[in-house]
Amino acid sequence: MVATPSEQRWAETVTTGAGGRLDAWLVARLGGPSRMQVKALIEGGRALVDGRIVKAGHRVRSGERVEVAVPAPPPGELAPEPIPLSVVFEDADVLVVDKPAGMVTHPGAGRPVGTLAAAAIAHAPEMAGVGSPRRPGIVHRLDKGTSGLIVLAKTRAAYDALTAQLAGRTVSRRYLCLAHGAVRRADGVIDAPIGRDPRSRVRMAVAPAGKGKRAVTRFRVLERFGSGASAITFLECALETGRTHQIRVHLASLGHPLLGDETYRGRRAAADGDPELPGLMDGLNGVALHAAELAFHHPITGEAMRFSCPLPDRIARILSHLRNTTR
């Protein structure tokens, strides 16, 4: 196995612990990653047993050689960066921000600086000790190419309460997006499990029955533009679960990838005879997906809170163009 520059290669032959699950066996020997992190490495094909990809529940046998590409340990706590934030709401416990497209929520492989997390602790230094050292205050995330509302916790009590609300599915998140093709149904529910795409480390995919994690997206068509291969649909989506790339994967699985989404082939088509649309899509700086509404209960007072923010210009310009040219 060849490790990337951000990984370290680890290998050992099984001499003790035979009969145990692979994920538990590795946790006891790697001395750092959690069981969930180790399981993610295995599911992502970054762990091999005698050169083979196996499942986390594989029972290791004496004499087997286990190899793992382990992410290099990150440096200490995240350094604050004085990056301007669009603050929608703030009090002593929570911070609600309108994140721009192009900004990463927290540091990851290849994106160590310029993150929302680093900007947040520069804005509110007390957040530095909340949650994990590299993800201070982060209770949920938005993809780099997605804009819109995200809530961060400024205290440990707020962090615990908000993560509990997310786990209990009582946080409401509404998105607006532009997708390729004419979505025929006026509304509907996509209930399809999502897991790591076995063909790509950077993609997710709808998983076969019995695999992946349950993912549920509700959608409603707001407007349709054009026809045939050049059609585009403006939709509202609501999350019942919060899986990685959920809306992007679910809509792409129906044949309607989002505009600007190169990962899920969203740039495969443009309106025939429309010379302006490609340029407008180039200005997206991400995907045509915006977290427009966020609702939760205040983690300390219990008060119902609801926030909304308008479409950013990067998407509004395309929508205006479509309304003026394709009706």
Image (cartoon, helix red, strand yellow):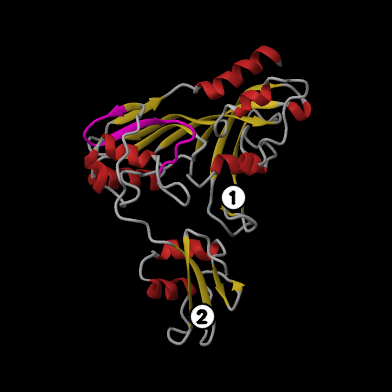
Q: Residue at x 54, y 43 (%)?
A: 246
Q: Amino acid at mark 2?
A: Val
Lower sequence index among marks 1 and 2: 2
Give the x, y percent position of residue 279.
65, 24
Find the magenta span and give its range.
89-106
Residue 327 visible to the viewer: no
Quadrant of res 304 = top left
Quarter of the view holding residue 125 = top left
- Give the numbered dot on residue 60: 2
Based on the picture, tell me whether residue 97 belongs to the magenta stretch.
yes
Residue that numbered label 1 is attached to: 203
Element under disc 2: loop
Q: CA distance from mark 1 to mark 2?
A: 29 Å
**Is residue 13 in view?**
yes
- From the viewer's perspective, tell me whether residue 77 is left or right of residue 150: left
Inspect the magenta stretch and tell me whether residue 320 lies in it. no
